[in-house]
Image (tube, rainbow, N blue to C red):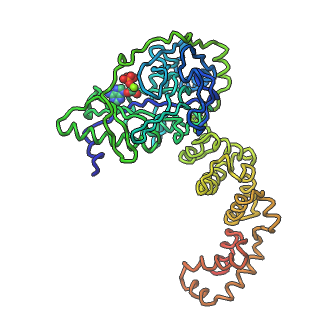
Amino acid sequence: MTELATALQNWEPVIGLEVHVQLATRSKAFAPSAILFGAPPNSLTDPVVLALPGTLPTFNKAALEMALRLGVATVSKIRAKSRFARKHYFYPDSPKGYQISQYDEPLCEEGVLDILLPEGGRKRVKLTRIHLEEDAGKSSHAGAFSLVDLNRAGAPLVEVVTAPELGSAEEAAEFMRALHRMVRYLGISEADMEKGQMRCDANVSLRRRGEDRLGTRAELKNINSFRFVQKAVEHEIARQARILDGGGTIVQETRLWDADRGASFSMRSKEEANDYRYLPDPDLPPLHVDGPLMMNVMRTMPELPMAKLDRFVRDYDLREPEARQLIEAPALADYFDAAIKAHGSDRAARTLAAWITTELGGALNRDGKSIEDSPVTPAHIAALVKLIDDGTISGKMAKTVFDEVYTTGTSPDAIVARDGLRQISDPVEIERIALEVMAASPKQVTAYRAGKDTLFGFFVGAVMKATGGKASPQVTSDVLRRLLS
Ligand code: ADP
Ligand code: MG
């Protein structure tokens, strides 16, 4: 048994996440500079970002609207009047010496987010709060020097804080996936973790199975991939169990997850809120959310991931795993909807879903492309499935046609017309070919008739070969069965 499995026999993990998501505004939260990943270091700054004396912040309303979209999507209580606070800490990546955040009057409280459980089903996770804040810059350390890039400083973030009720490393990773999916559906962030647009701190504690009281937690900082969330939490569970089983106690502290080494290191003992000397920011007026703003947000809400999942299962009779695959990215779900529309019949949904998730998904995956760059359009997939449905081409021929659509972007109908592809399904013609095949292989015919059933495939293959793969598999098999018996 692995160390983790042993730990889980006695101990129940409790995990709470604090996730930061960068909002996709064009300019910063309180300053005019643009936000652009990969720009030359320190090219996206201005007097406000640099905290030059006499500068004042002005709040970017676009960030509020985006945060509200998430608040509405998570059924949060939204504060009509919330407030910005200064969170003080001294670090070179924050020129002001404090971060503008929200403290005791956050924008959203008491929301929920449903996650998909790996074993099937869902779990509703409580959100303590969602608040607005600004990002810090980025330091890099090179030997005796430290460098700071302030391009990211002042970018708007939402911080989403869950209640301590995730029960495993998998659930923690699934929460990240659910939030990632949600913000992308809402169009408020690309949430590209490789670009640091979404990252999380994981708080982990253990309690003896059956116990109600929460154990002492450690906080793992700045985890930046789904896989690392899972790894870091698993590692932390095993670490704490080892200490507790040895009679030790857990120190409440902040630890840094080192993905390269697959280990965590103590950074500092946990800071308390009063270490930050929070105070309402006197330079910023309270944030008001009025009726027209809320109406606008509500009116432009898209169909949300779980509603889409339910609809795909209910209306299109998809199996849950396939439906889960299709709702993963909003563009993929839209692609599927468009394919059904192009085909014109809901009954083709399962077949369309299979082509999209297997053939198309496989090819895109192989080439590192996303659905947005697919050379095969929803109309192409629909046309291909129609050609199979009306018997023009076989499923096997369709795969060859698909490959050509994928590489050239030519429509399936054009390829079929150009190459004269047409499945042979006339039993008379197939019978003629089958008789030729049988005449050429008398030994196999005798052996088959003597009981060697496995030879059936040989005859099917021979007919296929003689017709260049165009014989209808169904008709071929019917005809051969009759002739050989
Ligand atoms: P702080 O403000 O000190 O960071 P919070 O109470 O705001 O503490 O909680 C921060 C995060 O830690 C939340 O996601 C919460 O669910 C989680 N958390 C709090 N206590 C525990 C615990 N005992 N075990 C696991 N997670 C916890
Ligand atoms: Mg915290």
Place of residue 436 in the rendered image (x, y in percent of width and height, measured from the top left): 72, 85
- Along the line of sight, the residue nearer the viewer: 7 or 59: 59
Q: Is residue 406 left or right of residue 255?
A: right
Q: State whether residue 394 is above or below residue 175.
A: below
Residue for point 64% across, 54% down: 360
Place of residue 362 in the rendered image (x, y in percent of width and height, measured from the top left): 59, 56
Q: Which quadrant of the figure has residue 210?
A: top left
Furthest-left residue in view? 247
Q: Is residue 253 left or right of residue 85?
A: left
Classify the position of the C terminus by image quarter.
Answer: bottom right
Q: State whether residue 95 is above or below residue 224.
A: above
Place of residue 475 in the rendered image (x, y in percent of width and height, measured from the top left): 70, 70
Residue for point 59% across, 76% down: 457
Could you tell me if residue 68 is visible in this image? Answer: no
Place of residue 326 in the rendered image (x, y in percent of width and height, measured from the top left): 60, 45
Could you tell me if residue 312 is visible in this image? Answer: yes
Residue for point 64% across, 81% down: 484
Q: Is residue 253 left or right of residue 405?
A: left
- Along the line of sight, the residue nearer the viewer: 66 or 309: 66
Q: Locate ligand 2 by image quadrant.
A: top left
Q: State whether residue 104 is above or below residue 270.
A: above
Q: Which quadrant of the figure has residue 422?
A: bottom right
Number of residue marks: 0
